[in-house]
Image: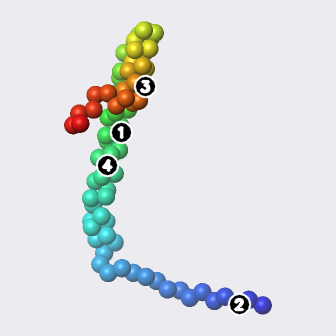
Amino acid sequence: MLDIALQDIAVHPPGTPLQPVLRAWPAYLEYVVSFLTIGAAWLAHTALTDRLARSDPIFWRSEGSRAVFGRLFHLGESGR
């Protein structure tokens, strides 16, 4: 028979519960800033797509080819 006894061990860090949160404020700030940045990009994208009354096939072909060739050949990179 296997008998496992667990002991109640409470680990309480020194100080108040608010102190670890205050020490970690840069991580929380990074989270909030990244969330707001992604939210702003999403809102801008939504506003842009809402303004598109119709799709122009020539525009989409030119933008698609620019994106593909720009990635393949690294066009537009500065600092070479």
User: Considering the image in quadrants, where does the C terminus appear?
Assistant: top left
> Can residue 46 be seen here?
no
Reply above or below: 50 against 76: above
Of circles 3 and 2, the one toward us is: 3
> Which one is nearer the viewer's eye here, 61 or 5?
61
Residue furthest to the left in view is: 79
Of the numbered discs in the image, which one, if any, rests on residue 32? Answer: 4
Give the residue at mark 3.
Answer: 68
- Left or right of 2? Residue 10 is left
Give the residue at mark 2.
Answer: 3
Residue 61, how many percent across, how many down? 44, 14
Q: Quadrant of residue 64?
A: top left
Badges 1 and 2: C-beta atoms under 8 Å apart?
no
Q: Sequence-wise, which precedes: disc 1 or disc 3?
A: 1
C-alpha separation, residue under disc 1 versus residue under disc 4: 10 Å
Q: Sequence-wise, which precedes: disc 1 or disc 4?
A: 4
Q: Quadrant of residue 49?
A: top left
C-alpha separation, residue under disc 3 versus residue under disc 4: 33 Å
C-alpha separation, residue under disc 4 versus residue under disc 2: 48 Å
- Badge 4 marks a residue whose secondary structure is helix
Residue 71, how many percent across, how many down? 39, 30
Q: How many marks?
A: 4
Residue 54, how many percent across, how many down? 43, 9
- Left or right of 42? Residue 22 is left
* Circle 3 crowding by C-alpha within 10 Å: few under 14, some 14–19, many from 20: few
C-alpha separation, residue under disc 3 versus residue under disc 2: 65 Å
* Circle 2 crowding by C-alpha within 10 Å: few under 14, some 14–19, many from 20: few
Give the residue at mark 1.
Answer: 38
Residue at (36% x, 79% y) in the render: 13
Q: Tell me the kind of residue under disc 1.
A: Ile
Residue furthest to the right in view is: 1
